[in-house]
Image (cartoon, rainbow, N blue to C red):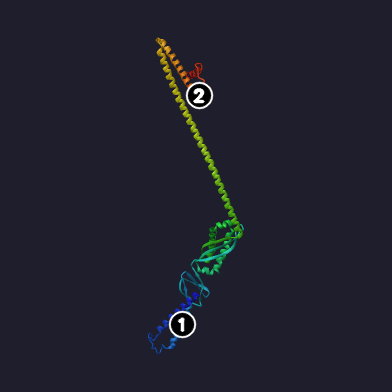
Amino acid sequence: MKSCLKMATKKLLIAFLLTYSCFTSLSPKHSTVHAGTFWNPVVRTCVVAGSCAVILGGAPCLKIVTTGDECLVERFGQFNRRLGPGWHLVLRPFESVSFHGTTREQVLDVPPQQCYTLDNAPLKADAVVYLKIVSMEMARYEVENLSEAILNLCLTQLREEVGKLTLDESFSSRDRINRALLLDLNEVCRTWGVQITRVEIQNLEPSPDILAAMELQMAAERRKRASILKSEGERMTLINEAEGRASAQLANAKAMGEGVVLAANAEKARQKIEAEGLKIAIETVAEAIGDRMVGDADHDINSKKGQGKFSQTQSIEKAMEFLALIRYLETQARFAAGNGTKVLMFPSKDCLPLTHEGLRGLLD
């Protein structure tokens, strides 16, 4: 309606301008002929009427094409030329505008339709197709109804692509379906002068029964994952505890081994020190006893040599008996300090040689 009003307004404006220009050009002050002989009311009325008739008759021949649109003109029913943006003259009734289209990108809405997946699951799918006409001649003369043809082609290809996938794959393969539809539609629409720029799947809606089954499946999957995570956590806890106990036992065994080695080394050092002390004590006591025995004796040189050797052996024996007696007394003192001690037995001269003989055998 608005386009018709605009067209009528333009026609009236053009007619008024042409009439006014004719009227002013034929007025008496601009004419070289005398006003009484040429410019009279009858002539003026005829000129105005003729101008209006010419303007009104020629106005429909004017065709205005806006930017982004194109028109096709047929002469005597045969394609003649293409009209771009601007003002054009169409020789009616010999010529006519057979097709008026746009070169801008268009959007075609594909309504929801029933589809079946590879595993026979029903679902409804709809899409949006973005297209652009690149050749008005092919879009006009290669197909009768361009929008209907593209819509039916998209519906058919959409059913085919959904039927190649299972239900689970169809939800995760939207990009795959979009690419396949774009290739299939462009392969056919190229012959119609149309370029499909983009195809987008909007919704994939399964039936209510499948939705309920999918919800149950998702709930079971969540419970399964929760159980697996719980068991994995318990297993890791047990493994960590076992590793901790094993590490603790290894550390304890290592520490005990090092303790035993250190205790053995300490005992070895203690025994070595005690042996050295005992040796020094024996030598000191024997030397003291030998000096005492040599000082009291008065013999010749030969007897001194033989007696000196006897005196050294005898001094060692006396020193060992003395030290054995001291150790025995120390042991008896420790026994006496105990609560369960009742009888104390002191050594005599007869029992000491047993220990003395044993020590002497060790020294020899």
The image shows residue 307 at horizontal and vertical percentages of 43, 12
* Residue drawn at (53%, 42%) of the image: 241
Residue located 58% across and 51% down the image: 224
x 42%, y 83%: residue: 23
* Disc 1 crowd, CA 10 A, few/some/many (<14, 14-19, 20+): some
Q: Please name the residue that numbered disc 1 is placed on.
A: 52
Identify which residue, 90 or 172, lies in the foreground: 172
- Residue 344 is situated, as x and y percent measured from the top left of the image, at 52, 21
Of the residues shown, which amino acid type is indicated by label 1?
A: Cys
Mark pair 2, 1: CA separation = 157 Å
Which SS class for mark 2?
Answer: helix
Tell me which label, 2 or 1, sits earlier in the chain: 1
Q: Is residue 189 in sight in this rendering?
A: yes
SS at circle 1: helix
- For the question of whether residue 118 can be seen, the reply is no
Q: Which residue appears farthest toward the top when viewing the image?
A: 300
Residue for badge 2 = 336
Label 2: how many Cα within 10 Å (few below 14, some 14–19, many 20+): some
**Kind of residue indicated by mark 2:** Ala
Q: Position of residue 154 (x, y in %)?
A: 56, 63
Q: Residue 159 carries which label?
A: none
In this rendering, which labeled residue sits more in front, label 2 or label 1? 2
Query: In the drawing, does residue 293 fall left or right of residue 121?
Result: left
Q: Residue 249 in the image: x percent, y percent? A: 52, 37
158 versus 343 height, above or below: below
Query: In the rendered structure, are the residues bearing label 2 and label 1 in contact, judged by CB atoms less than 8 Å apart?
Result: no
Viewer-proximal residue among 345 and 201: 345
State how many labels appear. Answer: 2
Q: Which residue is outermost to the bottom?
A: 36
In-front residue for pair 28/295: 295
Does 176 appear above or below 238?
Answer: below
- Asked whether 233 or 328 is in front, the reply is 328
